Every structure is written in C-alpha cells, then in structure tokens.
Image (spheres, rainbow, N blue to C red):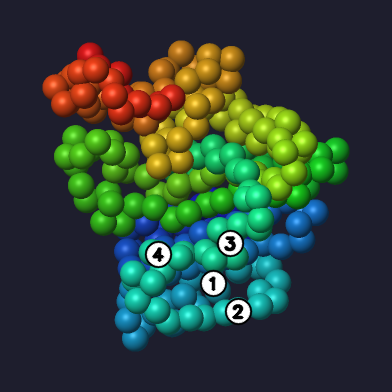
Amino acid sequence: MPISGYSPSGKTTPHVSNSARNVSLWTLLELHRKQFGKIVIRGVSTAGAAAERQWDSHLAALGDGVAAPEAHELARMSWLEFALNPFPDLFAMPPGGVSTKVKDALLKTRFTDRQIAVAYDYLTRTDHDVMGGMLGLATYGGRINTVAPDATASAQRDSILDVACTTGWLDPREEAKNLTWVRAFYRDLFAETGGVPVPGDAYEGAFINHPDTDLADPSLNTSGVPWHALYYQANYPRLQRIKARYDPRNVFRHALSIQAG
C-alpha cells in the first residue's frame, strides 16, 4: 500500500498531487494495526456532479498495484451534515466512553523509507496487543496553503499531509500499554529530530486541534524546540501579547495554553 506520497515505483502518489490539484477532495487513509484487520480510506468531495468520478479516480491511483477494496460505500449529504457527524462509527461511544491519544504532525513531503519501515513495524509487530492502534494520513493543503503563515494563529501553510499516530481503549487497565505503544511509535518516526516534527524542510510542527502535552515534556521531546514553536512557530510572541492584553490574570488556561509574554 503506497503511503504518504511514497510508492515502490518512485511515482508521486495522490497524497502529494492532491494538495495542489484536487482541492475539492479531502481523504483520510487509516492504517490500522494488523490485528484489527482493516485498512480504511474515507473521503469527502465538494466537486458536485463530478464527486463520484473524482473519488473513483483517487481510489484507483491510491490502490495501484494492490488488491481492490472489499467494500465501497457512497453517501450524499450537505457539508453541514458531515461536519456535525463526520465519522459516526468512530465517534459513537459505548457506555462509559472511549479513551484516545492522538499524536499528530504536519508533513511538507513524504515519509522517508526509514519512516515507512518504522510504520510497518509498529502496525504489524505481534509483541504489542494494541487493537486500537492506527496511523492516520489526512490530505492537507489546497486552499489552506494559500493563506499567509502570519495571517492567523496557524502558521502551517505549506503542508501536504496531517498524519497522526493514534490509539484508543475502552478498559482503563489498558491505558499504560496503549500510551507506551503510541509514544514509542511517534518517537521513532521522528527520531532524527528529537522525537517530534520540528519545523524545517520536511515538517511544519503539529496541529493544535490535536493537543498533545507530550510535546511539552522534555523526556519525550528531546529536540530542544519548545512545544509552542511546534504549534505556532513565529506567531507565538504575537499571541502572547494578545493573551497579556485580554487575559492578564490567565483565567482561560490549560496545559498547552498561551503564556502571557
């Protein structure tokens, strides 16, 4: 299965070309742990009458050289319907709820061969019993990348993928093994930059909508780059000034909230 812009033949895959060309198509490739038994591809198109053809073309390109999908479901709905309940099978929580850990990164280019080997290892190895483990690869860019990095709090305007090492569990007794797996997976993916996606030629840090307090832990983020630089880059000083003006007493706060300058 080609992932993150890589294919064995060396061709550019849809996740790369989609960022600039198919701006009306968003997709999510879910590479679940092998014990889960599924690889899932989801997509949303706003191309109107051409949406089904666009989706079929993307699926064909993504699946070049691998077996055809076992199931294919298509639904038409308004954008608002999708936005309010995007993935009912993922977010329909059982009694007592589900616990999750999401560790994300924004990529400006494809994974390296070493990173692909790391992903394969963590998704297939049998010495971990982590049913909810997954690597998600969501297409990114398009019109998002037409906005200047300093126009909003979000500086990431040059990425092609939002990827996430994710796990989920129902039994509180399974928390430790799930956290151990997902933290090690993420650390090994970005081992060459201190265990986190340091902004540079390959990465653009992380997405604050997926907050991860591990990025503020020096034992897990050994890059020397502070958490706020991963999320906000050069925009952080301006956000600090805004914080100082409108919330000088730090009433609105959490583990990764803006600190007044």
Q: Are marks 4 and 2 in contact (CB under 8 Å)?
A: no
Residue 92's label in the rendered image is: 3
N-terminal of the two: label 3 or label 2?
Answer: 2
N-terminal of the two: label 1 or label 3?
Answer: 1
**Amino acid type indicated by mark 2:** His
Q: Secondary structure at mark 1?
A: helix
**Amino acid type indicated by mark 4:** Leu
Q: CA distance from mark 3 to mark 2?
A: 21 Å
Q: Disc 1 designates what residue?
A: 59
Count residues near mark 2 (Cα–Cα under 10 Å), then give few for <14, some for 14-19, many for 20+: few
Q: Quadrant of the C terminus?
A: top left
Give left or right: position of 105 versus 247: right
Count residues near mark 4 (Cα–Cα under 10 Å), then give few for <14, some for 14-19, many for 20+: few
Q: CA distance from mark 2 to mark 1?
A: 10 Å
**Amino acid type indicated by mark 1:** Leu
Residue 84's label in the rendered image is: 4
N-terminal of the two: label 4 or label 2?
Answer: 2
Q: Are marks 2 and 1 in contact (CB under 8 Å)?
A: yes
Q: CA distance from mark 4 to mark 1?
A: 25 Å
